Amino acid sequence: MFKPYVNVEPAVNLVRETLESGWIGEGPKVKRFERELRERFGFEYVLALNSGTAGLRLALALAGVGPGDEVITTAMTCTATNTPILEQFATPVFADIQYWTGNIDPSDIEHRITEKTRAILCVHWAGYPCDLIEVHDVARRYGIYVVEDGAHALSASYRGVPIGAYSPFTMFSLQAIKQLTTADGGLLTLRDKELYEEGKRRRWFGIDRDRRRMGLNGYAHWPQVESGYKYQMNDVAASIGLANLMVIDELLERRHAIADRYHRELQGVPGVGLFDRRVDDRTSGDWLFTIHVERRDDFCRMMHDAEIDVSVAHIRNDLHPVFGPRRDDLPNLDRYERSYISIPLHNHLSDDDVTRVIDTIRGGW
C-alpha cells in the first residue's frame, strides 16, 4: 500500500558529505533545500522543519491560536492534523466533509463559527485540493486565518496557484512514505514576510540566529523576545531531501500517471464509486487513490486474498477518545466512513502491478 522511495546513491553521497563536514544540525544543506523547494514549487517563504505536525503547531501559534480558542477542522484526517490544536490548548470543532472528495465542506463551516474561532484548518484529502475560494470567503468575513494541511498535496495546484502559495500557512509532510521524503520532516510555507521571520525564530527556541553574535566568553548573544520550539530540520535530513528533489519530477509524473489510469480504467465498475477528479481548476498531489466501494469488508477480503494491500489510511478523529465523543452532526462523514478505501499508489509500482490491481477490482467481489 505504501512504500518509501529514496534516490539512494545521491542521498548517500550527500549525507556522507554532510557528516564529514562537521555540521549536521540546521545549516547550509537546510538553506539549500529551502531555496530549491521555493524554486521548484513556487512557494514564497519556506521553513524546513522536523515534522509536518511541527508545521501545523507553528502555524497555529503564528496565527494566534491559544487557550480557549476554537479551530474549525475536519475529522477525516490523521490525528496529527488535530493534536496540534490541543497542544495550543484550543478546541477542534469538526465540520462535515464532501462525500466525493473527503475534503471539508465549505457550506458546513460558517454556522460553526463562534467568537472563539481563530482559524479554519482544511486538509487536502489524498492530495486533491479543497474548495479554497469558498473556504477563504468564509474566513475573510470573520477575519480568521486559513491553515492548509497539505500533507498529501505536494505538487497540487488550485486555480493555477501551487498549493503552498495560496493561503497564509500551508504544511507539507516529508515523512517516510510521502511523495518527497527526508526520512522524517515537514515544511511550513508562508506568504507574509513578518510571519516568516517570526516562524524562523520560533522554530529554533525563539532565537534569532541571524542576529546572534559570539562573545569572547564563548557565548552566542541574541535578543530573544519570544518563546519557541525545537522544530528545525537538520542537514542530514535535508541531504536526503535534496537527493530526492533531483528526481521529484519523474516521481510525481509516475504517481499522476498511475492515478489517471485508475480513474480511467475503473470507470463504470460495479460497486466502485470514483472520487471527483476535476482538471479544469485544480490538480491533485496524488498521494492516495481513494474510492468508495460497496460491501467494503468483502472488497478488502478479496484484495487481501489477491495479496494486494488496501487501507482506509485514517479513521475519523472523533472515534479517538482524545477528540471524542463521536459527533452526531456529520452526515456526509457518517456515510463516507462506511465505504471509503485506498488502493496502492507509490513509486515502486510497475505497469504490471497496476494492471493486476485494476483487473482484480474489475473481477468483482
Image (cartoon, rainbow, N blue to C red):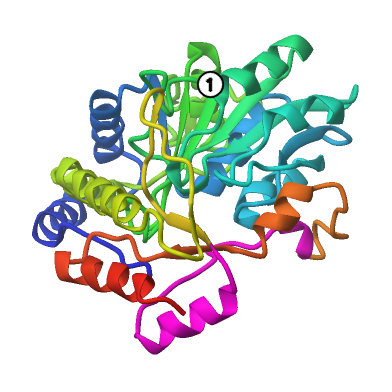
Residue at 47 percent across and 35 percent down: it is 219
Q: Position of residue 7 (x, y in %)?
A: 16, 57
For the N terminus, give its image quadrant: bottom left
x and y percentages locating residue 138 in the rendered image: 72, 18
Total numbered labels placed on residues in the image:
1
Q: In which quarter of the image is residue 277?
A: top left
Residue 226 percent across, percent down from the top left? 66, 26
For the point 47% across and 20% down, the residue is 166
**Residue 14 versus residue 108 in the image, above or below:** below
Please give the range of residues in magenta.
Answer: 293-319
Residue denoted by label 1: 167
> Based on the displayed image, in which of its 4 quarters is residue 306 positioned?
bottom left
Image side of residue 133 versus residue 31, left or right: right
Quadrant assignment, res 70:
top right
Residue at left offset 63%, top offset 18%: 136
- The answer to whether residue 44 is left or right of residue 74 is left
Q: In this view, does 280 lie to the left or right of 119?
A: left
**Dot 1, how many residues are within 10 Å of its Cα: few (below 14), some (14-19), or many (20+)?**
some
Q: Is residue 220 above or below residue 308?
A: above
